[in-house]
Amino acid sequence: MNRRGFLNQTAGWTAAATVAGSGLLFSSARAAAPIVVGQSAALSGPQASFGIAMRDGIQAAIHLVNRTGGVAGRPLQLLTLDDEGDKGKTEANVATLVGNPRVAGLTGFTTRPCSEAGAVLAAKEGIALVGAFSGTPLLYGQKAATTFTTRASYERELEAIVSHYRFLGVQRFGFLHLEDARATNVPLLESILARQ
């Protein structure tokens, strides 16, 4: 499968995962060439527990799909590279993954800086990034044209939180954040509070 085909079949993967338990997929997944999906995640360093959990969850989903025949008879395979939660290492990993002709798409990137770096490079290379786990605004714009998110943007999440607490009568807000998110999330929250 080429990378453009991966973009077109992303919806098919979602459907395949949904019907995998019903036995509707082919049973010859072990014999066909695998569909390889690349991941850059923190498997070591301060963000390791999150990166490992993300990888393990993806592996569990892949195992379920493969156990019931794969996607159109082809097994899925995850190729994970450790980025230690570092943007520069993520960029190097993305270059390695997109340079591998077996890699059809990318998934499971973690942290804001690494998701942003992966999304920009994925768009530049014309390869899909499905399921970056961040709500950073960049993932929802043209710089990340081949990124398919699986969560709401930080803005939508914060709007919903503020709206809910305003409904409950709360007028004052405190905000805890990671230092690497300060430049994005603090001005965003201040803007939302001013609008509501």
Image (tube, helix red, strand yellow):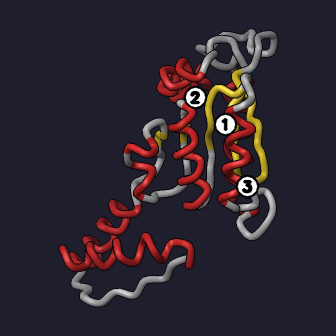
Query: Upstream in the sequence, badge 3 or badge 2?
Result: 2
Q: Position of residue 126 (x, y in %)?
A: 53, 30
Which quadrant would the C terminus be assigned to in this image? bottom left
Label 2 close to label 1 by CB (< 8 Å): yes
The crowding category of the residue bearing disc 3, from other C-alpha atoms within 10 Å (few below 14, some 14 to 19, many at least 20), is some
Q: Position of residue 144 (x, y in %)?
A: 46, 44
Q: Position of residue 175 (x, y in %)?
A: 43, 83
Q: Nearer the viewer, mark 3 or mark 2?
A: 3
Judge whether residue 63 can be spotted in this image: no
Q: Nearer the viewer, residue 21 or 90?
A: 90
Residue designated by label 2 = 17
The residue at the point 31 percent across, 65 percent down is 160
Cα distance in 3D space between marks 3 and 2: 30 Å
Cα distance in 3D space between marks 1 and 3: 26 Å
Label 3 close to label 2 by CB (< 8 Å): no
Image quadrant assignment for residue 89: bottom right
- Is 193 on the left or on the right of 175, as rendered? left
Image quadrant assignment for residue 43: bottom right
The residue at the point 74 percent across, 14 percent down is 29
Q: Nearer the viewer, residue 181 or 157?
A: 181
Cα distance in 3D space between marks 2 and 1: 7 Å
Q: Nearer the viewer, residue 184 or 12?
A: 184
The crowding category of the residue bearing disc 2, from other C-alpha atoms within 10 Å (few below 14, some 14 to 19, many at least 20), is some
Residue designated by label 3 = 89
Residue designated by label 1 = 61
- Identified by mark 3, the residue type is Lys
